[in-house]
Amino acid sequence: MNKYWDKRYQVEGKIWGESPSRTAEYALKIFEENKAKNILVPGSGYGRNSKLFSAHGFDVVGVEISPTACKIARELDPKTRVYNASALDMSFLFDKFDSIYGFNILHLFREEDRKLFIKQCSYRIKNHGLMFFTVFSEKEESYGKGNEVEENTFESKPRRPVHYFYESDLKDHFKDMEIVETGMIDDPEDHGEGPHTHILRYICVRANKS
Ligand SMILES: C[S@@+](CC[C@H](N)C(=O)[O-])C[C@H]1O[C@@H](n2cnc3c(N)ncnc32)[C@H](O)[C@@H]1O
């Protein structure tokens, strides 16, 4: 997966432009209402979303597997501390965070790695902290296209399997946490094949550690 993304950033640069996803704006509002001051952004790409949080005074840490994306991020969003590493092993981070925002990263993993990724995030969230994840839903245009490599996981683009989430499946991934909110958000993009809209699901959960 590393090579797939790094190649894309090398060829396409700031793939989705410099504006944040509208899901980041939505998550920002929730985090601010909860008085969050710092945030972890796993899969932070070249920084278009982390920049929104750093511009609003958050202390931001990004973890991104593509070295090319990290390089761009350090120019676009110099306030964010970016680590070129895998979000599947964030044991090098000693900070605990008030909030975590993961944009379209959870759906990139196979089942075992999805569990591992959520575990890695839950180790790094403070008690009562909030985590917000967006994922491709089954309503995406690409759902069902390409090889089905696992249940509801399709390789609609070569070398980039995506898990498409139904609501019950998404909730099931977070069954050990308090689910604050789930919903759908249309996320317009304009790149590659031209203007198109992703039909994303999101989930916001609170960590209640005993
Ligand atoms: C759909 S992109 C979203 C990028 C970014 N959040 C944005 O919208 O600008 C998913 C990102 O996750 C990164 N990624 C994939 N696997 C990863 C992993 N194991 N650890 C950290 N980042 C990963 C990719 O390199 C890519 O930047």
Image (cartoon, rainbow, N blue to C red):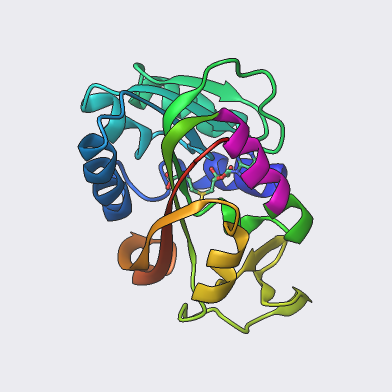
Q: Which quadrant of the render holds ligand 1?
A: top right
Image-quadrant location for residue 159: bottom right
Task: Identify which residue is drawn at 21% across, 39% down.
Answer: 33
The answer to whether residue 6 is magenta is no
Farthest residue in the bottom direction?
144
Whole-percent x and y of residue 145?
A: 63, 82
Farthest residue in the front direction?
210
- Whether 206 is drawn above or below 72: the answer is below
Chief SS of the magenta region: helix
Whole-percent x and y of residue 111?
A: 74, 61
Nearer to me, 119 or 142: 119
Check the picture and name the quadrant holding the C terminus. Answer: top right
The answer to whether residue 117 is magenta is yes
Whole-percent x and y of residue 182?
A: 39, 64
**Bounds of the magenta segment:** 115-124
> Image check: 6 left or right of 78?
right
Task: Decide if residue 169 is in sight here.
Answer: yes
- Whether 112 is drawn above or below 136: the answer is above
Task: Identify which residue is drawn at 67% across, 34% down.
Answer: 86
Task: Identify which residue is drawn at 23% across, 26% down.
Answer: 55
- Whether 32 is drawn above or below 185: the answer is above
